[in-house]
Image: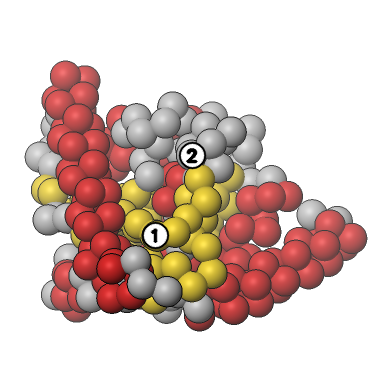
Amino acid sequence: MCACRDAAASATSIGAEVILRVWSASWRKNTEQILLLDRLLAEGAPVLAVFWHGKYFPLFALAEGRHATVFVGQSFRGEIIARICRRFGYEAVLIPAHSRSGDAYRLIVDRLSATRFGVLAVDGPLGPYHQVKLGTVRLASQLQFLIVPVSVASDPKCVMASRWDQRELPYPLATVALSLGEPIRIPKGLDRKGLLEWSDLIRTRLEAVDADAKARTLRSRPLEAKSGLG
């Protein structure tokens, strides 16, 4: 990256970090379930936390400091996202934009083998919407990582309906809740049929934590909001 692009990426990421910190400080947070993830990590379990691409924005702040390895496509936008990740305590790995799929997969395998805690948007980076990529299942099977489904819900929120991922952005002062599902251990040596079956299971589990996160926002809302009082 040339010096001017590097400076622009740095300045943009600093600005984005400041905005996100101020923004997220206003949220009413329900993050008690992240203790389930902390327990797995403390026990030394290799973990791959997975979520939908449209849900990732609040996770910068909600999971801060948990030295996860995040994989980002290499581009100017990707460099900005990577720098934001690092400012929140994550390790960001840029995947070359024009690499062959096998090269990208080997890079991810190498980095996960070294760190033993990674996060992936299972329908990213470009969709289709809520379709679990088979590469995620193959990674967890090959490396014997536990897959932990993660979701975030917020109320009120903005949904970017024109985007493929229906990205969700909590409003300032929103109630934001995090939900984690039970860890999934995927067996080794799966054929394509097995990969498809396990990807369907991961989708089902993610949809379940989506519903649980939404329910947690409703339980966490202030009394006056629930009753309709001003």
Question: Residue at horizontal 57%, vertical 73%?
Answer: 23
Q: Secondary structure at mark 1?
A: strand
Q: Is residue 51 left or right of residue 44?
A: right
Where does label 2 land, which residue?
Answer: 166
**Amino acid type, residue under disc 1 in the picture:** Ser
Q: What quarter of the picture does the N terminus occupy?
A: bottom right
**Amino acid type, residue under disc 2 in the picture:** Gln
Residue 154 is tagged as: 1
Determine whether label 1 and label 2 are within 8 Å by CB: no
Question: Are there few (<14), some (14-19), or many (20+) residues within 10 Å of tag 2?
Answer: some
Is tag 1's residue or tag 2's residue first in the polypeptide sequence? 1
User: Residue 111 sits in which quadrant?
Assistant: bottom left
Can see residue 112?
Answer: no
Residue 228 location (% of width, % of height): 34, 66
Q: Residue furthest front?
A: 229
Question: Residue at horizontal 18%, vertical 46%?
Answer: 208
Q: Secondary structure at mark 2?
A: loop
Can see residue 193?
Answer: yes
Residue 29 location (% of width, % of height): 36, 74
Question: Are there few (<14), some (14-19), or many (20+) residues within 10 Å of tag 1?
Answer: many
Q: How many marks?
A: 2
Q: Is residue 55 left or right of residue 139?
A: right
